[in-house]
Each structure stands twice: as structure tokens, then as C-alpha cells.
Image (cartoon, rainbow, N blue to C red):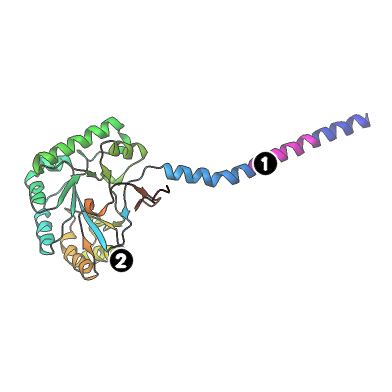
Amino acid sequence: MKEKRVRIFLLRRGMVLALCTLALAAGIFYVTLYPTSRAAAASQRQLPIYSVECKNRLCAISFDAAWGNEDTQLLIDILAKYNVKTTFFVVGDWVDKYPESVKALHDAGHEVMSHSNHHDHYNSLSSSQIISDIKASCDKIEAVTGRCPTLIRCPYGEYDDHVISAVRSLGMEPIQWDVDSLDWKDYDADTIYQRVTSKVQPGSIVLFHNAALHTPEALPRILEYLINDGYTVVPISQLILTGDYTIDHTGRQFPAEPREN
């Protein structure tokens, strides 16, 4: 009887040791491979362009136009005073309401790009719905300006992999920003100025809105700062890279590394 108990004890002990060994091996396997798996998953994530790696002191200023139109002509006049060209992302519904402003932006030399057709949440739409929405907005813009947009800023700045894939299937580039003025929160001009000038760097894309309360007051000081600091402000299409490029985990666009022969 005693020998039987010993055998049972040894058997159970052997099973425990075997399970511990398997658990240890699994742990080592996980620790070893997890960083690689996580890196692979990150590299496969679809990202828009937030900023661009560039050697020169270039940056881009952008305005989203979705609702109001009180200050659009004032912004055009301010930008003209400093001989600065920018990019306006406009919603299709906004084009319907203010075609004369869309034409004025284009005639002043600014880029007019898509900000969707109805400013819907793209994450909740199917790929086919997103594509239809973008095409509708681009058709409206092209009808006024004669140029079909090549860039888009997703409504609310929202996106996921299927949104970015849908955008790029149209040969368009999705654009975010790395400097947010937060002018839509109706911050005063000094706060907007400090936010932009403290964060801008070569390759930055700055976000404003065409109908924000204090943007016309802050914009001249910001432009003077950028110009005096050696920056050239260009439309986004002149800032971003074409051809082979990579986008890192922060959304910064880099030239692709030369391939070895």
C-alpha cells in the first residue's frame, strides 16, 4: 500500500514538473517572439501622413472648412499679404453652399482638397461607402476649380486601416497634422500663437479652421514668426514626398532607403 502511494506521488510530481517545463518553454517563446510580432503588427498598420522628414525649413499650413464661411476671404487676404500659399480641405456640402469661396481660394493659388462630402464618421462606413463619398466631394471641387483633389483629410481626423486603404485605392493621400492650433476651441490669439510656434518644426503640417473665432487675429503673427525663423510655408502637396517612401509609427513620412543591388 505504501509503495503504491509512493508511485502515485512520484507520478503526480512528474506531471507537475512536465507542466512547469512546458509553461517555461511557452513563456520563453512568447517573450522572444512577442516584440517581433508587435513590431510586425505596427508596421502593417495603415497610417496617414502627419508630418514629413525634410532637411530644409519647410512647413505647411492647412485649414479645414466644414461649416461657417465668415472669415474665408479675410484669411485669403492675410495669406496674400505674406505671399503664402496653403491647403484648404473642404467638405462637399460646404462647396454646395459657398462655391464662390471655393473659386476664390483656387484663384488665389491655394490648394482645395477634400474633407469628405458630408463630414460623416468614416470609421462607421464601409469601404464602398467611403469611396463613393470621396468621389462625390472630389467631383464637386473639380466642377468649381477644374482640378481633382489628390489629398484628403478624414472627417474628425478619424481613421482605421480600412479607411486608409479605401482612400489610397483612389490614388489619394490621407493627411493629418502634427501641430494642432486647437483654434476650434475658441482659444484667444495668444494661446493659438504659442501652441503653433512652440510645436512647429521642419516638415510640420499645421491645422487651422476657416471659421474659428480668433484664427484671423493669430495668423499674421504666426506667419511673421515662421518667415523670420527661416521657414518657407508651402501647400501640402509640395511638402509631402512622392515615389517610394515610408511612414513611421508617428505618421512621419521618410524617403525609402535605397535598395541594395
Mark 1 Cα shell of 10 Å, populated few (<14), some (14-19), many (≥20):
few
| Front tag of 2 and 1 | 1
* Horizontal side, residue 223 vs residue 143: left or right: right
Q: Position of residue 139 (x, y in %)?
A: 15, 36
Q: Which residue is mark 1?
A: 25
Residue drawn at (18%, 59%) of the image? 215
Instruction: Let me know if residue 154 appears in the view.
Output: no
Residue 82, placed above or below residue 130: below
Let me know if residue 6 is in the magenta part: no
Q: Main secondary structure of the magenta part?
A: helix
- Magenta range is 14-27
Instruction: Let me know if residue 147 appears in the view.
Output: yes
Q: Position of residue 256 (x, y in %)?
A: 37, 50
Q: Residue 198 has which mark?
A: 2
Residue 82, placed above or below residue 178: below
Q: Earlier in the sequence, mark 2 or mark 1?
A: 1
Residue drawn at (82%, 32%) of the image? 11
Q: Helix, strand or loop at disc 2?
A: helix
Q: Amino acid at mark 2?
A: Ser
Front residue of 196 and 31 = 31
Let me know if residue 18 is in the magenta part: yes
Q: Position of residue 208 (x, y in %)?
A: 22, 55
Where on the picture, by quarter, is residue 113?
Answer: top left
Residue drawn at (20%, 35%) of the image? 135
Give the CA distance from mark 2 to mark 1: 50 Å
Q: Helix, strand or loop at disc 1?
A: helix
Q: Amino acid at mark 1?
A: Ala
Quadrant the N terminus occupies: top right
Mark 2 Cα shell of 10 Å, populated few (<14), some (14-19), many (≥20):
few
